[in-house]
Image (tube, rainbow, N blue to C red):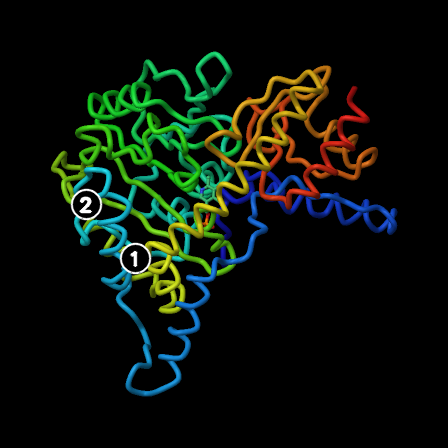
Amino acid sequence: MAIVNQNFLNLSGRYLFSEITSKVNAFQKQNPEADIIRMGIGDVSRPLVPKVIEAMHQATQECSCSATFRGYGPEHGYSFLRQAICSSDYKSRGIDIDESEVFISDGAKSDTGNIGDILSCDNLIGITDPVYPVYIDTNMMTGRKIQYIICTPENGFTGDIPSNKLDVVYLCYPNNPTGAVITREKLQKWVDYALANDCLLLFDGAYEAFIRDESIPRSVYEIPEAKRCAIEFRSFSKTAGFTGIRCGYTVVPRELSAAAKDGSRVFLNGLWERRQSCKFNGASYISQRAAEAVYSPEGQAQITADIDAYLDTAKIIRAAMLEMGLNPTGGDNSPYIWSRTPNGMPSWEFFDYLLEKAGVVMTPGAGFGQAGEGWFRLTAFQQKDRTIEAMNRIIKYIK
Ligand SMILES: *Cc1c(COP(=O)(O)O)cnc(C)c1O
């Protein structure tokens, strides 16, 4: 008799964005004329930059002749990309990361979800609330205990340092969904906590490229000693529009260890290497050449222009929300703008209201956790003219 993983039966019925899609589709079916503007899902809208396209064409060409054809690549990524990451993302900021500490993958969703494979199911997991649902669902799938770290305007959406011992803590800054960033001082407090409690930090830096404020840390490793307590996840998805191409990476420092049952220490770099080489066969050669092109001078200029354009769109959203009398966070170093709903309306009720009245899709805060109830998220990834149109419509129904 095959028995299911009982933990799956404890998951909430559906992944948040499937729920939204089915609601929007149902509405569109009933109102075929409605011009719906999607300000909800965190997907980019700008096309890949020319330098990336050029690299992909070239890589495709290489695969067309036997002398340069590539089959299986190294499971943890080609050296050309890992080197580019070490020098451009780390060395340039004074952080020493060795190539052997970088693992290329098909994205940060897989890695943040899969990292649990190398960690005991008995760990007590700290997860900020509201949060990217992947951290919660993947831990629930293995039946781990979760302690929520409530993020509010009072703690700058960066959580209060827990008074008890957590074994693993997920942090994501710039944050999805709140758009909040973490200061160096606060990140230092989390690192201090982790080192003092033998706690592993899982730092998701998927939105690092949106940071414009020079005082905000771009990597957890900017904090001294963080290499002894943190794994960092990065992705080309939001940085360079790779949501459809798929490429990301994870840094597992050599000196990072965790306890075995007998109390001895085990290095996590070796465990992750073992896990990846068993269950993962590498991101495609074409994706990795595309990612490498992001680090060329032209590539950098091109993606920076795209992110600047998203940040301009974020400004439009913020300004409109202020005009509505809301008090939004985010949008200055992140593509997300987060706010309480008007008049304390429950999140899903406000979702239906905006969809039906204004034909605008937002993401209900409640979908990101209990602490998100009464909040909503708008994204700056929509095209600029559509965003202006959406905000004009919302203002009409909110004022
Ligand atoms: C979009 C996003 C990612 C990136 O996911 P990919 O699988 O690399 O596309 C990771 N973490 C968060 C919080 C995100 O919002």
> In the rendered view, does 18 fall on the left or right side of 67?
right
Give the label, 1 or 2, closer to the camera: 2
Up the image or down, 257 lies above or below 59; here it is above
The residue closer to the viewer here, 137 or 338, is 338
- Some atom of ligand 1 lies within 8 Å of the CB belonging to the residue at label 1: no
The amino acid beneath tag 1 is Gln
Residue closer to the observer: 244 or 141: 244
Q: Point out the image quarter for the C terminus.
A: top right
Q: Are marks 1 and 2 in contact (CB under 8 Å)?
A: no
Q: Amino acid at mark 2?
A: Ile
Residue at x 66% of width, y 40% of height: 39
Residue drawn at x 45%, y 24% is 148
Q: Position of residue 70 (x, y in %)?
A: 32, 77
Residue situated furthest left in the rendering = 264
| Residue 298 coordinates in the image, percent (x, y) | 38, 56
Q: Which residue is mark 1?
A: 276
The residue that mark 2 highlights is: 97
Write down the quadrant of residue 223 in the picture: top left
Quadrant in the picture for residue 397: top right
Tell me the element at label 2: loop
Residue 78 at what x, y percent from top left?
26, 64
Q: Circle 1 — which element? A: helix
User: As rendered, which of 385 and 17 lies closer to the eye?
Assistant: 385
As drawn, the residue found furthest toward the bottom would be 66
Distance of label 1 from label 2 (alpha carbons): 19 Å
Q: Please determine whether, in this image, residue 364 is positioned above or below residue 62.
A: above
